[in-house]
């Protein structure tokens, strides 16, 4: 996705003014030519941004620090805060709720609108550190829940296997989460464009119908 930037070259060398004309009255044959001004060095080229291959060679930050997303059109801040808290308790806090409380929360999560709740799923990730194995699995469950809610097959393939904590796999997890958020912000205008939101709802409804047919088979 990253494309190296073009090298930056100077339009004109800095300080390369023409030498002053010789104003002496000596004969042309006896006078030495004035030394030419040395051209200034061109500026160093701007450093190119890292490519995906280069990024893969070093660990990406495992702490998820997303800027909070706004509620989608048709929902409000109070709804979003409530849904985010629900998903955080269900999946993220202490590695996820357990027992009777988890059963109750699962029922509430199942009732969340699949379109309006997208920013709640993403906001619930904020502050999560997937450097912790328990958080790797917790985040996987949250991602998997959202995918099922909107009828997606694994569009965002987030590795759940906690025996795989190597740098390459961890970088993939980070890139999947970043890609999920970027998709919502860039492709769906973060739920702030009504026409895009309507199109997305149609996509979800079609995906759910298709997934229902697959499940029955």
Image (cartoon, rainbow, N blue to C red):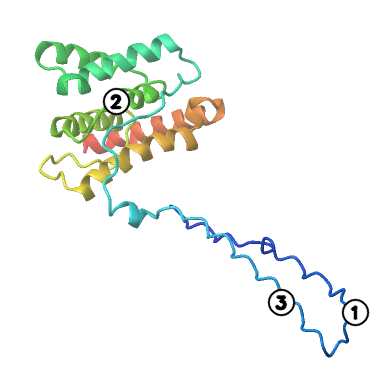
Q: Which mark is residue 135?
A: none
Q: Tell me residue 154's x, y (percent).
A: 28, 41
* Residue that appears at 46% across and 14% down: 75
CA distance for labels 3 and 2: 64 Å
Quarter of the rendering containing residue 194: top right
Residue underneath mark 1? 25
Toward the viewer: 130 or 89? 130
Closer to viewer: mark 3 or mark 2:
3
Q: Which mark is residue 35?
A: 3
Q: Tell me residue 190's x, y (percent).
A: 47, 28
CA distance for labels 1 and 2: 79 Å
Q: Tell me residue 92's x, y (percent).
A: 21, 23
Asked if the residue at tag 2 contacts the one at tag 1, i.e. Cβ–Cβ closer than 8 Å, the answer is no
Query: In which quadrant is the C terminus drawn?
Result: top left
Residue underneath mark 2? 127
The answer to whether residue 75 is left or right of residue 207 is right
- In terms of sequence position, does the residue under pointer 3 or pointer 1 come before the other? 1
| Mark 3: secondary structure | loop
| Mark 1: secondary structure | loop
10 Å crowding of disc 2: few (<14), some (14-19), many (20+)? few
10 Å crowding of disc 1: few (<14), some (14-19), many (20+)? few
Closer to viewer: mark 1 or mark 2:
1
């Amino acid at each position: 996705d990253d494309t190296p930037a073009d090298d930056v070259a100077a339009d004109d060398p800095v300080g390369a003014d023409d030498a002053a004309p010789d104003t002496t009255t000596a004969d042309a044959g006896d006078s030495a030519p004035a030394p030419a001004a040395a051209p200034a060095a061109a500026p160093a080229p701007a450093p190119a941004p890292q490519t995906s291959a280069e990024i893969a060679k070093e660990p990406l930050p495992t702490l998820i620090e997303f800027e909070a997303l706004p509620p989608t059109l048709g929902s409000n801040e109070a709804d979003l805060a409530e849904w985010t808290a629900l998903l955080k308790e269900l999946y993220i806090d202490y590695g996820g709720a357990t027992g009777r409380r988890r059963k109750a929360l699962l029922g509430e999560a199942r009732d969340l609108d699949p379109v309006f709740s997208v920013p709640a799923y993403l906001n619930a990730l904020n502050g999560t550190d997937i450097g912790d194995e328990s958080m790797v699995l917790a985040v996987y469950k949250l991602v998997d829940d959202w995918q099922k809610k909107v009828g997606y097959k694994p569009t965002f393939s987030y590795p759940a296997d906690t025996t795989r904590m190597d740098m390459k796999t961890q970088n993939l997890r980070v890139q999947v989460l970043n890609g999920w958020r970027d998709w919502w912000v860039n492709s769906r205008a973060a739920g702030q464009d009504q026409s895009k939101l309507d199109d997305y709802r149609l996509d979800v409804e079609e995906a759910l119908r298709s997934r229902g047919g697959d499940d029955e088979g």
